[in-house]
Amino acid sequence: MDVSRWISRASMRLRALFRGAALDAELDEELGFHLEQLIEEKIARGLSPDAARREAILAIGGLEQRKEECRDARRVRVIEDVFQDVRYAARTLSRSPGFTIAALLTLALGIGATVAMFTVVYGVLLRPLPFPDPDRLFLVALSPKSFLMRQPGMADRTYVQFRESDRSFQHLAAFTWYKGNLTGAGDPVVIRVGSVTTEFFDALAVKPAMGRTFLPGDGRGGERMVVMSDQLWRSRFAADPAIVGKDLTLNRLRHSVIGVMPPGFDFPNRTAAWTPHEIVIDPGNSLLVPVLGRLDPDVTVAQARAAFEAAIESVPDVPRDDRSQWDIGLLPLKELLVGDVRRPLQMFAGAVVFVLLIACANVANLLLARASGRDREIAIRAALGASRARLVRQLLTESVLLSVIGAALGVLLAHWAVPLLLALAPAGRIPRGEMIRIDVAVVAFAAGVAAIAGIVFGLTPALRLTRRRFSRTLLPGGRSIAGGHERFRAALVIGEIALALVLLTGAGLLAKSFLRLRAVDPGFRTENVVRLSIELPDSTYSTPGRLQTFHQEMLSRLASLPGVVAVGAVNWLPLGDMHLNGDFRVEGAGEDAPFNVDKTVASPGYFRAMGIRLLQGREFDMHDTGTGPPVVIVSRSVARAIDPSGNVLGKRIGLWGRENSREWLTVVGVVDDVRQLGPSQKSHAAAYQPYLQMSRNLFLSNMTYVVRTVSDPLAAIPAIRNVLSSVDKDQPAASIGLMRDVLDSATAEPGFYARLLGTFAALAVLLALIGAYGVVAYSVAQRSHEIGLRRALGAQDRGILWMVIRRVVSLGAAGVVLGAIIAWLASRLLETFLFEVTPTDPATFIAVALTVFAAAVLAGVIPARRAARVDPLVALRHE
């Protein structure tokens, strides 16, 4: 292709597109020049001026025809037609401000809700992980499901065997995390520390911004080193450029800083620092660790899965048939972050699609109502030669223009709504929050939604409007037949009411479930209770004696604070993120009890401070020490297992050891069961030992103090912090706050789900009622002649009112019946989100159906009253 010719043509088309008026003027001038030349030639041959002009025009073939041919030669006619359609659509919409504003507000709400939810879904579920080739990263799972492992993993010894034999993964790394006490860099603080094997950073393909990461052999021989996050480096070390090679103190031990990671890297789950993890195989025990792998470039996912399945055949204890209680397989790494929120986000995405459909149906209704006033316009354009396709294109241009403007307003609404949505969500519940933002992908989605929505709600009205016969419309006083429009608009309203009822039923089920969850008795009282959690490092508190001395000092000083009525300590706080359970045996029984118990350590005063009811016997006291007889307090469920008659005081149970080596503990009290894992979980059987009789560091190093006050507990928090600082100035609080907040956070997630779906449902119901009102009001306007005639013949107001209300009653009843059927089928999707409520709860279905039906009837009251006030003389004179 001749480049210069191509450039010339492109330049001409751009000029035709953006300077069409100037080109048309040039074209007129050029054609005028040729015409004058021809006229002069004809006159020179002896023709009169008029005849010469006529002959010249015939020779040219018609001026306007030649102009059109020249314009077509520019090959921008389609674009010019689009611009023309857009300009005409804008003028048409500006002449109907009421319709335009109503349509734009409806679309802004529908598209705004959709874009806001897509922004969250895209950021959490769809946006790739911020690592090179994230689709090559997998979690390797081969472990029984357990409360100790919320993520899939492998036994450490199995990991070592698998790593040695594996040929599918380029890098394979184990990782875990713990809470570490950082001191010497401002106030003491608890940070999240990742404990990772040396290939961890290579598997993620992330390089440090400064220094290096771990190498094989790091961490052995007592050498302590740490890699820190960019956020920790900036917040605690003032972005010191010479930080590499310096020391930081973690859990009272000095670690050499060998590197700083780039900004934004904090895997796994907001980690502030990383230390090397060396797996040491214990023949008598095995720990579970998450395992991360990056596939070799030459290995497909299918090949890796097949190789993994073949490898686990040699692993003992893995079930060959029923694997329902095991996590086995290769899972995309993203599942570690988003597995728990995938279903809720999908549910809410479906809900906003319902809202968008209702908004589109509403705008389609508005277009159909407006179409009755455009019959004459469309008929004239058709009579002048416009084809049906041309008319449909013009009408679709109007609907798409509406949709595009509505989408722009919706993006602005989403820009405001997304931060609000994230702020209202329970803390830490929505993962990858830093990836949730409105960017090019979100705007592109909004544009796609606008285009699809414009076609969806505009195509049917356009086709119905342009398929009519226009002969009667062009006659003076001509009237078009609106029966088809009426039936179609009624069908749209019935669909809107049905979809709104589905959403409102779901919201009602979630709300009822939430209220029942809030009414659950957790087994303790949270009023005026402050909790303070600490994690004591082994480097300083290496023996049970040191740990017990620390706790004794803390409890003594906390009890002396003014306004404190009870103080206690426990290692596994109810509603916390940890607990440990296991088997137990009753002395004299032939076998272990039929269920496990939580094995908990508590201090004297704990049950009183927490408000846990003492049912029999006594609480712990200061005589329950290591020199005294070993004792235990059991919960109600354990007492029934020991002796169904309830007479358990003085009996002995064994919690530790095997067979004849068990240590027997005397039951001195019985307390109520508590819901250790949350209000939605069953009450846990528990056995409590006094902390002064516990000889295992694991049960003493992590402790939570609970302080009950006589008045505002918030006022006591500064004094409680001062007590901790006075006992050990370098010991930070892992967390401190009100116990009431802990209970509230346990129910925050279902409450958030109920409120969010309720918001969508309320929006859907509002839009559906607007649609019902529009249909009835339009029907009244169309039947004003009939209503006037009826009133002239003696019809009473009551009869006119019932005639109109009957219309909305039929629409509401049909929508409620259809919606109830859909809701009955769809409600089973909510089953996993409900607590003590069935997905087909009759009371909820009936209440929602009556509410929606009553609201639909109320939507027809204003048009009905307007119909009853129609003046028969005015209506008949207008006709």
Image (cartoon, grey):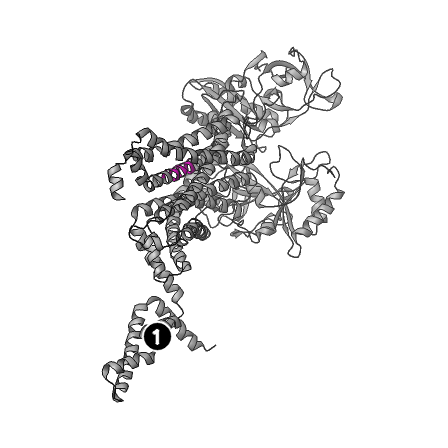
Answer with the quarter of the image where residue 865 lies: top left
| Left or right, 378 with reference to 583 | left
| Percent x, y of residue 16 | 35, 69
Q: Is residue 9 visible?
A: yes
User: Residue 287 in magenta?
Assistant: no
Decide which of 182, 493 is in the foreground and name it. 493
What type is the residue that disc 1 sits on? Arg
Decide which of 417, 456 is in the foreground and name it. 456
| Percent x, y of residue 336 | 58, 42
| Percent x, y of residue 371 | 36, 49
Q: Residues within 10 Å of mark 1 (few under 14, many from 20)?
A: some
Answer with the quarter of the image where residue 642 lies: top right
Which region of the structure is painted magenta?
A: 762-773
Can you name the residue that lies furthest to the bottom here?
45
**Quick one: quadrant of the C terminus?**
top left
| Percent x, y of residue 19 | 32, 68
Can you name the residue that lies furthest to the front here?
793
Q: Vertical placement of 517 versus 760: above or below? A: above
| Left or right, 136 with reference to 853 | right
Decide which of 493, 688 is in the foreground and name it. 493
Identity of the residue drawn at 68% across and 50% down: 304
Principal secondary structure, stretch drawn in magenta: helix
Q: Which residue is mark 1?
A: 66
User: Residue 765 in magenta?
Assistant: yes
